[in-house]
């Protein structure tokens, strides 16, 4: 009986150590995810500010649809009423304005 109790006690403490290790790994991963999300939000806000400084509303809309909302070129062109080629051309002009 004492042997069984000692074995159960050992198993309990082994299990507790495993849970603590799991908790530490979980907390570490959670912190990494939070840091990644924070960096992503900061980049998003920087992009938003740069885009908002453009004068042309067309340029702003195109860049927001593509880079902030993540639409494909097909969808961007469709939403703006342009062909894909026109959307590419507007995009290149807008990027040129950003470089100035």
Image (tube, rainbow, N blue to C red):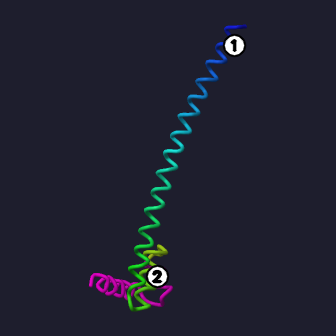
Q: Is 4 rendered above or below residue 80?
A: above
Q: What secondary structure is the stretch in magenta mostly built from?
A: helix
In front: mark 1 or mark 2? 1
Crowd rating for badge 1 (residues with CA inside 10 Å; few <14, some 14–19, many 20+): few
Residue 82 on the magenta segment: yes
Q: Quadrant of the N terminus?
A: top right
Q: Quadrant of residue 45?
A: bottom left
The label number, if any, that marks residue 76 in the structure image: 2
Residues 51 and 90: in front is 51
In the picture of the structure, the residue carrying the numbered disc 1 is 5
Q: Residue at x 49, y 50 (%)?
A: 31
Residue extending furthest toward the left = 100
Crowd rating for badge 2 (residues with CA inside 10 Å; few <14, some 14–19, many 20+): many
Q: Say which label, 1 or 2, has the lower sequence index.
A: 1
* SS at badge 2: helix
Q: Position of residue 36 (x, y in %)?
A: 45, 57
Residues 79 and 12: in front is 12
Q: Position of residue 56 (x, y in %)?
A: 40, 92
The label number, if any, that marks residue 43 in the structure image: none
Q: Quadrant of residue 43?
A: bottom left
Q: Is 48 rendered above or below residue 87?
A: above
Q: Is 39 rendered above or below residue 98?
A: above
Q: Position of residue 76 (x, y in %)?
A: 46, 82
* SS at badge 1: helix
Kindly report the distance in space between the C-alpha atoms of the residues bearing marks 1 and 2: 68 Å
Q: Quadrant of the C terminus?
A: bottom left
Residues 75 and 93: in front is 93
- Region of the chain picked out in magenta, as a range: 73-100
Q: Quadrant of residue 72?
A: bottom left
The answer to whether the residues at label 1 and label 2 have Cβ atoms under 8 Å apart is no
């Amino acid at each position: 009986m004492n042997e069984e109790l000692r074995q159960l006690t050992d198993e309990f403490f082994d299990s507790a150590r495993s849970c603590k290790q799991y908790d530490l790994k979980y907390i570490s991963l959670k912190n990494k995810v939070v840091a990644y999300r924070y960096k992503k939000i900061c980049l998003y806000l920087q992009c938003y500010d740069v885009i908002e400084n453009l004068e042309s509303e067309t340029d702003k809309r195109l860049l927001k649809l593509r880079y902030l909302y993540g639409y494909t070129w097909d969808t961007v062109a469709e939403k703006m009423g342009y062909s894909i080629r026109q959307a590419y051309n507007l995009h290149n002009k807008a990027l040129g304005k950003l470089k100035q």
